[in-house]
Image (cartoon, helix red, strand yellow):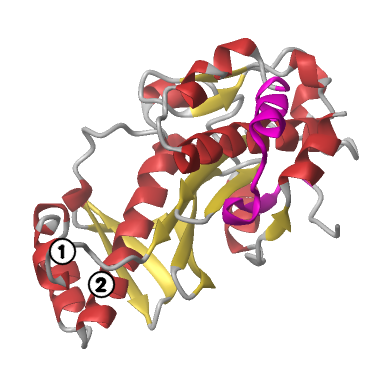
Amino acid sequence: MMEKEGGVRRWLVDVARWRPSPAQFDAVVALLPSHERPAIARFVREDDRKRALVSRLLQYSLVHHVLRIPFRQINICRTPEGKPYLVHICSLCTHSKNGSALPNFNFNTSHQGDYVGIASEPFCLVGLDIASVSKPQGETASEFISNFSSYLTHHEWNCIVRAGTPSQVLTEFYRYWCLKEAFIKAIGAGVGFGLQRIEFHHEHWTNISIHIDGRVSNKWRFWLFKLDEMHLASIAKGHPEDAVSSYKKTLSNATVAEEQLHSALESTEEAFTLWTVEQLTQLLE
């Protein structure tokens, strides 16, 4: 698989195609550290257990693949807001397998519908969100999105309701929601962050910009991807100084040089690399 060096990764697993037997599922669970397993077992539905398992498998596989940390030495913790982060155990942990420095190596996962994904960056913050554009049950598209009106700005709301057909309105809503989630996850904020504080502008969903508390921010870049007819994904990349305090403490260098940040933000955003569960488990062997 051809991939970028330097800690930039975009990985995706189609969990709908993975149909393990109970024994096969348990064998993959057994690969993970024991403290990760209750978070998988707590789900009742098989699909939810699969997503939770693959999300964690992606984290450990990616860290091992990029940083070459022995699998059993990988220590992934979570902030009080639930943001996963890597606890560095040695100086080599902040270098990729080709020796390049990764002072702020961070990653973010997301899962919904058929897909589970992970994105990582070496310098800037990264957030990933996957959305399943499914029709609401028992209510119209307008009724469904009205439940979220308090989280949207007037500008966003007007763009959504004027998008066209009910199907187009729903897709437009998920685009904005997906971007908001990616930003929140990138900075490590919890559910208390007011989503109405952020507003997105775009040119036919390119050149996407963010306004935070009414002011445009030049420290962030955003991308939207159409994974298939029913799934969207968004990537947010931004300055480490915008991380919430609990998450900022986990970063080695929150004061990234302007030139370095600009290079990271302006780098070409490429498509996701598709992995299977079997390929991920082979990485750990």
Q: Residue at x 9, y 66 (%)?
A: 143
Q: Which corner quadrant of the image does residue 26 belong to? A: top right
Q: Identify the image quadrant of residue 202.
A: bottom left
Please indicate whether residue 54 sits to the left or right of residue 199 in the image.
right
Query: Residue at the spot x=49%, y=45% of the render?
Result: 110
Q: Residue at x 90, y 40 (%)?
A: 98
Residue 145, numbered label: 1
x%, y% of residue 273? 71, 59
Please state if 204 lies on the left or on the right of 11 as rendered: left
Percent across and percent down for residue 242 are 40, 38
Q: Amino acid at mark 2?
A: Leu
Residue most toward the right?
Answer: 98
Image point 48% across, 43% down: which residue? Answer: 47
Label placed on residue 170: 2
Upstream in the sequence, badge 2 or badge 1?
Answer: 1
Q: Nearer the viewer, residue 55 or 40?
A: 40
- Which residue is outermost to the bottom? 164
Labels 2 and 1 touching (C-beta < 8 A): yes
